[in-house]
Image (cartoon, rainbow, N blue to C red):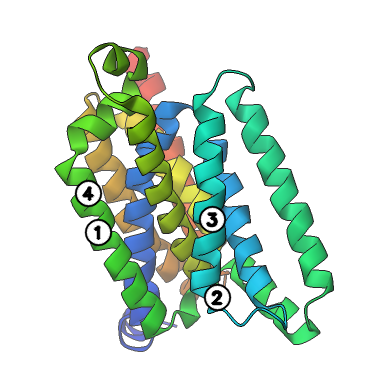
Amino acid sequence: METGEIISTIVNEFPYALYGSMLVGALCAFLGVYIVAKRVVFLGAALTQISVLGLALTFLPFLAIPHTIGSLIITIAAVILLSRLLTGRDIPKDATLGVVFVFAIAARILVMQKTPKIEVSEIENLLRGDILFVTPELFYWLVGVFIVTMAIHLLFFKEFTYISFDAETASTQGYRVKLWEMAFYVIAAVVISVATHIVGDVFVFGFLVVPPVAAMLLARNVRNIFAVAVLIGLLSPVVGLFLAFKLDFPSSPTIVAVASLVLLFAWFSRVAKRR
């Protein structure tokens, strides 16, 4: 396919795939800055697996719950428990997230053994992320989540940033750190649950980590880090989808690979500046 034909095909035949992946990329990159700053990178991996577990449960014959709703309920319930464990000091954060990650994968496998075979293939497709088959309903769900999430974070940008980058100082200055962290984790759970249903776990986890790390290498102050991360989150899906069509590659891995190349460039750029 020629370049113009590829662009026309994506824009005209797969608009929800294009705009949906851009929204997910931008939103995950934005939240990912907080996650990287909090040093809970594994949170993204754990929550994506919990989200898929929630989806798998809704395929059981005796649970007549819409897939997105079921995933949201399970993910929010898990993150409320997680938020208490992550703010405590009895167990290291990475150990807590590791246990949740492994449990979610094991539970999903067990659930899938009791799920009809035709649904098992659908769950596996959700894991890989069928970006090209995003439905209008899921896209509008995503738009709503994007608007609400960004509105909350922009309205309380100072509070969320403070408790993420310097929680101890925020606590000494009277901020209710545990309450703000609970709010952040619940919002992250909603975003990850909806996004995983649309683009798959690899895309979501990749964009929670790769664009924020690249932005931290390229930008100096906090606001610029957020801006660069979101820009990478917006542009990588556009380039990735084009290359996926051009080279006949799967969409999600190609998009994550493009973002990873940006990260590689950012790292080389930082090394060159130091020399």
Residue 201 can be seen, yes or no:
no
Residue type beneath disc 3: Thr
Q: Residue lying at the far left in this picture: please name it.
A: 155
Q: Earlier in the sequence, mark 2 or mark 4?
A: 2
Residue 190 on image: x %, y %: 42, 57
Q: Earlier in the sequence, mark 3 or mark 2?
A: 2
Q: Which residue is mark 1?
A: 148
Q: Earlier in the sequence, mark 1 or mark 2?
A: 2
Residue 97 can be seen, yes or no:
yes
Q: Earlier in the sequence, mark 1 or mark 3?
A: 3
- x 28%, y 18%: residue: 170
- x 64%, y 32%: residue: 96
Element assignment for label 1: helix
Instruction: State the image quarter where residue 91 is shown.
Output: top right
Q: Which residue is mark 3?
A: 75
Element assignment for label 4: helix
* Marks 1 and 2, how far apart at CA: 21 Å
Q: Which residue is mark 2?
A: 67
Whether tag 4 and tag 1 are in contact, CB under 8 A, the answer is: yes
Mark 2 Cα within 10 Å, few/some/many (few <14, many 20+)?
Answer: some
Whether tag 3 and tag 2 are in contact, CB under 8 A, the answer is: no
Mark 4 Cα within 10 Å, few/some/many (few <14, many 20+)?
Answer: few
Depth order, front residue of 61/40: 61
Q: Which residue is mark 4?
A: 152
Instruction: State the image quarter where residue 149 is shown.
Output: bottom left
Residue 174 on image: x %, y %: 24, 17
Mark 3 Cα within 10 Å, few/some/many (few <14, many 20+)?
Answer: many
* Marks 4 and 3, how far apart at CA: 20 Å
Q: Is residue 227 left or right of residue 252?
A: left
